[in-house]
C-alpha cells in the first residue's frame, strides 16, 4: 500500500532502492506517528472535517495501535511503504473509509517532521537523564577523593599538583555545559511543524495553535516553508549537542585508559570490569573505556554526516533527507549506552591514594616553592631561577602540604556551585509539559 498509488505499479528494483531502510528506520517513529495523528484528527473535528462520532472511533483505534507500539508488537508489513501507510491501513481495515480521512490537510512531509520531533524530544529527555546519572557519579567521586593529590600535566609532562577532586569535578562541569547545548537543541526541536503539509500550507482552515497545544510543543514553526526547511536542520542541531556530550566522554575515557596503565597506575578497574588477553595471562584491559572512546568519537562525526547530506539542497523536500534518518535515529541509543556504561564504570573505579609517594613527581611542587619565596619578598623571576637551579642540582626538597583556596582550586572545588548550575539548566527543559500533553491525548 502506498498513499500516493494510482493506476500503475512502480518497478520493483526502483521500489527496493527508493524505500531502502525506511521501514526499519520508521519503527523508531511508530508510536509518535500515532500521537501526531491523534492531535491532527482532534483538530480536524474542531474545524468540521470529521464528525464527533468518527473522531471518537478513530481515537479509540489509534490508542489501540499505540498500545501495540508500546508492547513492541507493531510491524510494517512487507508490501507497505512506511509507518504512515501502515497506521492508515490498520485504521481502514478496522473502520473502513473513515480511516482514510485522517490524512486531510496533511502531507507525509509534515507528518514525518512531527514524528521526528516527537521522537527526538523524548530521546533528548532520556539523554538528559543519563547525563545527570553520570554527573552525579562524577560529583560523588570528586567529593570522595577531594583530598587525594595527583599530578597535573601539560604537554603530557608532569606540571603542577592536581587532585582527583579536580579531575572528576572537571568532567562534571563539562557535562553541565554540554547540557546547556542539549537544552538549546531541545528548544529548537520542540516546535510544531504540523500543518505545513508539503511545505506550503493547506486550503483547509487548519488550527495549528490547537495541535501545538495538544502535542505539548513550546510553539509552532510559524512559516510553513521554514517548517519544511527544518528537516535536516533539526537533526544537524541535535547532532551537535550529541557530539559535544560525546566529546566529553571521549576525553574522559582517554584519561581513564591512560591513568589505568601500569606506567601511571593512578586508577584501577575491578577485575570483573576488565577483559583479558588470549596470550598474555597478566592482562586486564580497560575495554569499556576504549569502546566508550571509540563510540564517542564516531558520534562526533554525526553533525558532519548530516550536513553533507543536506548542505546543498534548495528549499523544499527532497528524498535525500530520508538518508539522514539512517545515521540520526540510531545515534541516541549509542550515546545512551555510552553514558550508562560510563556512569557504571566511574562508580566502580578505584583511586590510588599514594601516587605522590614516588619521588619522580617531586618536581611538580616547584611552582609551590616559587610562590612561597615570592610571597616572602623575593622577586618572582629570582625565585623561579633559584628553584630551577636547585632542581638541576638535585637539591630541591618539595613541601607537599599545599594550600590552594581560590575558587575552583584544589582546596575549594566549588562542587556545590557546579551542581547548582547543572540542576538549574536541567530544570529549564520543562519535560513535564511534553509528558502531560501526551498523557492527555492518550486518556
Image (cartoon, rainbow, N blue to C red):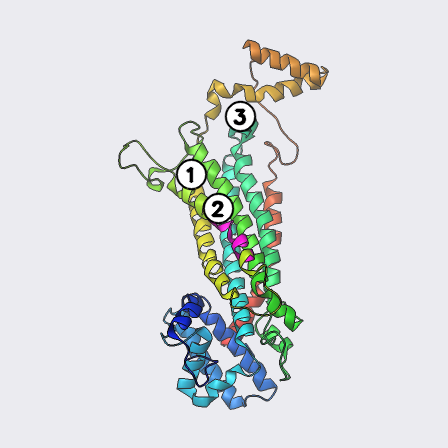
Q: Residue at x 46, y 79 (%)?
A: 62
Specify whether residue 140 is in view: no
Q: Residue 145: image x %, image y %?
A: 50, 34
Which residue is disc 2 drawn over? Answer: 297
Identify the image quadrant of residue 51. bottom right
Q: Which residue is mark 3?
A: 157
Residue 301 part of the magenta segment: yes
Residue labelled with disc 1: 349
Do callouts 2 and 1 mark residues in contact (Cβ within 8 Å)?
Answer: no
Q: Identify which residue is drawn at 30% across, 31% down.
A: 282
For label 2, count other residues whose C-alpha is less than 10 Å away and answer few (under 14), some (14-19) or many (20+): some
Residue 397 visible in rendering: yes
Magenta highlight range: 298-307
Mark 1 residue element: loop
Q: Do the numbered discs 1 and 3 sit on residues whose CB atoms are within 8 Å?
A: no
Q: Is residue 58 above or below residue 134?
A: below
**Rendered view: 116 above or below 298:** below
Amino acid at each position: 500500500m502506498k498513499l500516493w498509488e494510482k493506476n500503475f505499479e512502480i518497478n520493483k528494483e526502483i521500489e527496493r532502492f527508493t524505500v531502502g531502510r525506511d521501514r526499519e528506520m520508521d519503527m523508531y517513529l511508530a508510536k509518535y506517528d500515532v500521537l501526531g495523528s491523534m492531535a491532527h484528527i482532534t483538530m480536524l473535528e474542531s474545524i468540521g472535517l470529521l464528525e464527533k462520532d468518527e473522531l471518537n472511533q478513530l481515537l479509540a483505534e489509534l490508542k489501540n495501535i499505540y498500545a501495540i507500539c508500546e508492547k513492541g508488537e507493531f510491524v510494517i508489513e512487507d508490501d507497505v511503504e512506511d509507518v504512515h501507510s501502515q497506521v492508515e491501513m490498520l485504521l481502514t481495515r478496522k473502520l473502513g473509509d473513515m480511516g482514510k480521512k485522517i490524512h486531510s490537510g496533511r502531507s507525509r512531509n509534515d507528518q514525518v517532521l512531527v514524528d521526528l520531533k516527537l521522537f527526538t524530544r523524548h530521546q533528548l529527555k532520556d539523554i538528559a537523564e543519563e547525563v545527570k546519572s553520570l554527573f552525579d557519579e562524577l560529583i560523588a567521586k570528586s567529593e570522595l577523593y577531594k583530598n587525594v593529590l595527583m599530578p597535573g600535566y601539560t604537554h603530557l609532562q608532569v606540571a603542577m599538583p592536581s587532585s582527583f577532586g579536580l579531575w572528576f569535578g572537571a568532567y562534571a562541569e563539562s557535562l553541565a555545559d554540554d547540557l546547556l547545548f542539549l537544552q538549546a537543541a531541545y528548544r529548537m526541536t520542540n516546535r510544531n511543524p504540523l500543518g505545513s503539509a508539503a511545505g506550503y500550507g493547506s486550503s483547509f482552515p487548519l488550527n495549528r495553535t490547537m495541535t501545538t497545544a495538544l502535542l505539548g510543543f513550546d510553539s509552532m514553526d510559524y512559516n510553513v516553508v521554514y517548517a519544511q526547511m527544518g528537516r535536516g536542520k533539526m537533526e544537524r542541531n541535535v547532532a551537535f549537542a550529541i557530539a559535544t556530550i560525546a566529546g566529553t566522554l571521549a576525553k574522559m575515557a582517554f584519561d581513564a585508559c591512560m591513568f589505568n596503565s601500569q606506567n601511571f597506575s593512578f586508577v584501577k578497574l575491578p577485575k570483573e570490569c576488565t577483559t583479558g588477553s588470549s596470550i598474555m595471562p597478566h592482562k586486564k584491559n580497560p575495554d569499556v573505556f576504549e569502546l566508550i572512546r571509540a563510540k564517542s568519537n564516531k558520534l562526533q562525526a554525526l553533525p558532519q554526516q548530516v550536513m553533507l547530506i543536506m548542505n546543498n539542497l534548495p528549499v523544499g523536500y527532497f528524498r535525500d533527507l530520508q538518508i539522514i534518518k539512517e545515521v540520526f535515529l540510531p545515534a541516541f541509543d549509542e550515546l545512551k549506552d555510552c553514558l550508562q556504561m560510563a556512569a557504571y564504570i566511574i562508580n566502580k573505579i578505584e583511586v590510588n591514594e599514594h601516587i605522590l609517594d614516588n619521588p619522580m613527581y617531586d618536581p611538580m611542587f616547584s611552582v609551590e616553592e616559587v610562590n612561597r619565596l615570592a610571597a616572602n619578598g623575593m622577586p618572582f623571576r629570582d625565585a623561579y631561577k633559584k628553584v630551577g637551579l636547585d632542581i638541576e642540582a638535585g637539591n630541591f626538597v618539595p613541601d607537599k602540604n599545599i594550600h590552594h583556596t581560590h575558587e575552583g582550586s584544589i582546596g575549594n572545588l566549588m562542587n556545590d556551585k557546579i551542581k547548582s548550575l547543572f540542576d538549574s539548566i536541567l530544570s529549564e527543559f520543562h519535560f513535564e509539559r511534553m509528558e502531560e500533553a501526551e498523557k492527555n491525548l492518550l486518556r
